Amino acid sequence: MRPLGSSSATGLSPKQRPLYPIDLERAPCQRPADRRPTRAREALILRGSAAKVRAVSETRARFLRRFAVATVAYNLAVIVWGAFVRATGSGAGCGDHWPMCNGEVLPRPRSLEMLIEFTHRITSGLSLVAVLALLVMAFRWTSPGHPVRRGAVFSGLLIVSEALLGAGLVLFRLVAGNTSMTRAWFGAAHLVNTFALVAALTLTAWWSFGHRRLAPRQRPGLTATFAVALVATMAVAVTGSIAALGDTLFPARSFAEGYAQDFSPGAHLLLRLRIWHPVVALAATATVVTSAVVGHAVTRRPSTRTMGLAVVAAVVTQLGLGLLNVFLLAPVWLQLVHLLVADLLWIALVLLAASALEREPDPTPG
Ligand code: HEM
């Protein structure tokens, strides 16, 4: 049986056809078993089925859109909680056990660290379930080749690698008071994966609203501009994760002490690398603002204007929060806000790129 979206048997015009094709076989059948349908009755049945199918498709499309957006929002909360685990030194709250917590499936929390770490495990486990549910819906409710499917597949792969990287941190004891550079690079890889996951989920949600797929070769110059801005923002995030680890492991008691640590040859490498974060952030800001301006100038789409403004607002806010972080000696609440805004900036940048590089609509015949 052909899916509705690819069939003309429904009598629906292309405009009326549902965005999310479903199998006619699954729609309630109105054909009376005992009578042979006449042509007129056949037409009536088809129209009735088509209306029902359309209603079901619309309900599913709406559900998929809401679910995809909720999954992005939920994952942001999980990410921020993950930073809370690091900032409070709770990464070893479940010992070096994974996926069990101190060897138990459902432990009774015996310390605050254990409660914080176990909550992170539960919430990130639910995140895995949500992403897999998104994947199932994408494959059941959209037609082959729909970009939602591709976004959901990438999200599925990235949530699995995210879990494995998180497990690696615990199993190799790269948590709590561990000051090795292996921990710093592992943590940076975890953050790169997180950003890639957020990008995949964001694009899945974007495409679930019916936006067209990307056509990067249509505008190679614009594609290169966005590639530079995205890589630069990722680099800021990586240097930020190193700065965050340095602040957590070697907290300074005053601004002067922190400043001296940054330039002292005897200081830990994590502290000497910290200074690169604001430097890379300023360079990345230039690329991000350029992509917003060029993106709108080239495409002149209302969506690129909105997203461009969101990107500029987020990057300016982030620079302010970064400065505040330095002067207030990175209190935990501000670390979490700074990370959340970094993710929002990333989402806005991904959406800006998606709207600017969206394939041009097919020319209407005639
Ligand atoms: C494009 C702008 C920026 C972005 C996207 C960004 C992103 C990030 C990220 C992702 C982290 C790691 C958070 C974590 O793992 O918990 C971080 C940490 C940090 N950033 Fe930035 N940052 C930006 C600008 C700045 C600037 C301009 C400064 C300083 C002048 C700064 C200061 C810090 C500090 C002190 C930390 C460590 C404490 C913490 O985790 O909040 N940031 N940043």
Image: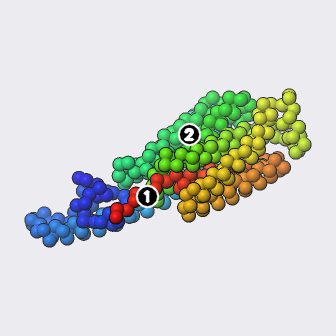
Per the image, the residue denoted by label 2 is 162
Camera sees residue 320: yes
Q: Decide: is 345 above or below 50.
A: above
Look at label 1 and name its amino acid. Pro
* Label drawn at residue 333: none
Could you tell me residue 181's position as x and y percent? 71, 29
Say which of 119 and 353 sits in front.
Answer: 353
What residue sits 62% from the left and 43% below the top? 228
Q: Separation of disc 2 and disc 1 at Cα?
A: 35 Å
The quadrant in which the C terminus is found is bottom left
Q: Residue at x 35, y 52 (%)?
A: 143
Q: Secondary structure at mark 1?
A: loop
Seen in the image, is 152 located left or right of residue 271?
left
Q: Which residue is mark 1?
A: 361
On whether ligand 1 comes within 8 Å of the CB at mark 2, the answer is: no
Relative depth, front residue between 114 and 272: 272
